[in-house]
Image (cartoon, coloured by chain):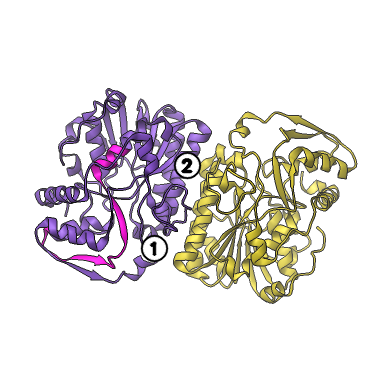
Chain colours: A yellow, B purple
């Protein structure tokens, strides 16, 4: 992954010497976040269960492996996780089941990770680290099919899959523990996040991963429908948003949208990937039935609230992000397939 | 409990000879609903675990005990519950943990009943009775502290306690299974429901129960603050709303408010109870701290959507309802204390 941009001074002063725990720290976002935290002078504990169906990958932290404390603990193991919390100033709560299709095939497994484990973790935080700043990685999936665009935080919540319901509950627990118990908790509703370190084995996490792989391997990119409009956040921008959320007092107790640098249709994105890859092709197919019924159609975020509160904005264009992602996976492909 | 008003013809034609299952059927609302279903010609299965902290009470079905199939099954027992579903045309899904304070003291117990068990039940419905009409008893608690009054269904969801989050998730699962799997599911967001059969042992269910008991026993009614405005639904009106929701095609896939016949402050309600009781007194005390932090302040519902769709309206005034409740508990007190 590329060197991060210079950190604003407030991030350095907040994290220098601090202790941060990152659940899901072997995933795409968690690994980049951990790297940024180390750069900012923090001590980092990564908690991850290396769930095979997730984006967790030890190669994601290859360059920082010796500088982080790595604990292979599943967030469902309440007692083990509680024992690790003590002394931490920041909790970046990123661990979760993120596949929409998997949540429909095994709804209870999704519930146990994304809903029940969040409640037990917050109970532990209340007991062990009541003064820590907590940031929860939520998702645009809580909105369901947009009733209007761009989607702001007042949009009704009507998830279209089990994953969306459980993430909605997990997010609400964070807000509740902020309101009722005085914890400092913030949630970010992420849109499609992509970049080096993402899952490219299949389309479980999101379709961009498998597209990148197909492009690199010279296979046609398979586009379903293609007219859907979406926004995309590059992993470094997502990590920066999580850092800023942790130190922004006005964000406390809020669930805020994170978007991308622009809106694009999936067909246009496929064209862009092929062009930046310097070759390849894509085919457009009808939406598979079992995905169609949980698909949300067009989505893009109004993230003006978070931008105003923190000064955050995407630093990476989609062209740059796709270029860096393709370059990364070309070099490291064997660790991800 | 009093004889029900004559059923509109559409209720009779819908339920005559039908098979209805009522979870939580020994509670105040479930028992009255079961009685109405029998009157309408339905065959009724009651599923209830007689949880000591709930309003479940065998005396609630004393007059219909021989005419219903009664199964002592906890909704968390997925397999046992699934086995009971077969052949039912209607599922009234009322079982739940309803104490706000208890949900804060034991959040996981609340989650397992109000959230996890709802998901397992819906999975079973999808497999066993995909064509049944399902009505879920949700709660105004999903809204949290009102941002405006009266609260309509567009109001943001920001629960102030664990119970509210879990009921929100339980409700969302019903909506999701309606959208994604074609189940016929409707949710009603009930406000304070009161009447014969409610829990009067303590303030676990809601404060009206203990007030009625204090009035009957000649003890001072204890009012916390007293300025809070609320609406109240008499149990028979709540049961009628559930019946109408089950047969209203336009309500399918919606979560709709149910309110009362008017708005009243708690102090005024205490005065009314004392007056109708023909004696007694009340004392006003400050709000206990652990309740204050989860209190929602003023709440009353805009239930115009449900009224328009179904023609429902409260048939019982607060005066009549309190009068009937006091009369009932004076006669049956020993079964409830």
The answer to whether residue B27 shows anywhere in this view is no
Mark closer to the observer (1, 2): 1
Q: Residue furthest right?
A: A278
Q: Does the magenta stretch include residue B136?
A: no
Q: Residue A198 appears at what percent x and percent y?
A: 73, 49
What's the residue at 29%, 68% (across, down)?
A: B225
Q: In which quarter of the image is the C terminus of chain A?
A: top right
Residue with the mark numbered 2: B173
Cα distance between the residues tagged 1 and 2? 24 Å
Position of residue A156 relative to residue A292, above or below, is below
Residue bearing the label numbered 1: B294
Q: Residue at x 64, y 72 (%)?
A: A19
Q: Which of marks 1 and 2 is nearer the N terminus?
A: 2
Instruction: Find residue A207 and report its image quarter.
Output: top right
Q: What stretch is highlighted in magenta?
A: B216-241
* Quarter of the view holding residue B242: top left
For image coordinates 62% across by 29% down, the residue present is A289
Chain at numbered mark 2:
B
- Where does the image place residue B33, in percent across and percent down from the top left? 26, 37
Q: Residues within 10 Å of mark 2 (few under 14, many from 20)?
A: many
Judge whether residue B230 is colored magenta. yes
Q: Quadrant of residue B221?
A: bottom left
Q: In this view, does A190 lie to the left or right of B140?
A: right
Percent across and percent down for residue B27 are 26, 45
Q: Measuring 27% from the left and 25% from the top, which residue is drawn there?
A: B9
Which of the chains bears the disc numbered 1? B
SS class, disc 1:
loop
The answer to whether A31 appears left or right of B16 in the picture is: right
Q: Is any part of residue A87 visible from this angle? A: yes
């Amino acid at each position: 992954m590329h060197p991060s941009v210079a950190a604003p001074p407030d991030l350095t002063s907040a994290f220098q010497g601090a202790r941060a725990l990152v659940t899901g720290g072997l995933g795409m976002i968690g690994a980049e976040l951990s790297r940024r935290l180390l750069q900012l002078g923090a001590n980092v504990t990564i908690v991850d269960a290396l769930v095979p169906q997730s984006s967790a990958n030890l190669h994601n932290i290859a360059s920082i492996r010796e500088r982080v404390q790595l604990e292979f603990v599943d967030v469902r193991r309440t007692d083990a996780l509680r024992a690790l919390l003590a002394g931490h100033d920041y909790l970046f709560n990123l661990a979760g089941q993120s596949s929409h299709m998997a949540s429909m095939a095994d709804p209870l497994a999704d519930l146990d990770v994304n809903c029940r484990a969040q409640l037990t973790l917050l109970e532990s935080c209340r007991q062990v680290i009541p003064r820590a700043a907590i940031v929860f990685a939520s998702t645009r999936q809580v909105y369901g099919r947009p009733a209007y665009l761009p989607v702001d935080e007042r949009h009704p919540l009507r998830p279209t899959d089990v994953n969306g319901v459980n993430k909605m509950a997990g997010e609400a627990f964070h807000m509740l523990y902020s309101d009722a118990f005085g914890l400092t908790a913030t949630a970010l509703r992420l849109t499609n996040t992509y970049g080096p370190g993402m899952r490219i084995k299949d389309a479980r996490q999101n379709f961009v991963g498998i597209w990148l792989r197909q492009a690199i391997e010279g296979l046609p990119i398979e586009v379903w429908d293609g007219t859907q409009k979406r926004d995309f956040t590059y992993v470094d921008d997502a990590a920066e948003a999580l850092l800023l959320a942790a130190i922004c007092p006005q964000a406390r107790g809020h669930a805020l949208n994170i978007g991308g640098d622009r809106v694009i249709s999936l067909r246009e994105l496929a064209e862009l990937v092929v062009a930046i890859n310097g070759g390849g092709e894509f085919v457009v197919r009808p939406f598979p039935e079992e995905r169609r019924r949980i698909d949300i159609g067009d989505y893009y975020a109004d993230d003006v609230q978070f931008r105003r509160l923190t000064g955050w904005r995407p630093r990476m264009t989609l062209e740059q992000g796709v270029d860096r992602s393709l370059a990364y996976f070309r070099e490291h492909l064997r660790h991800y397939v």
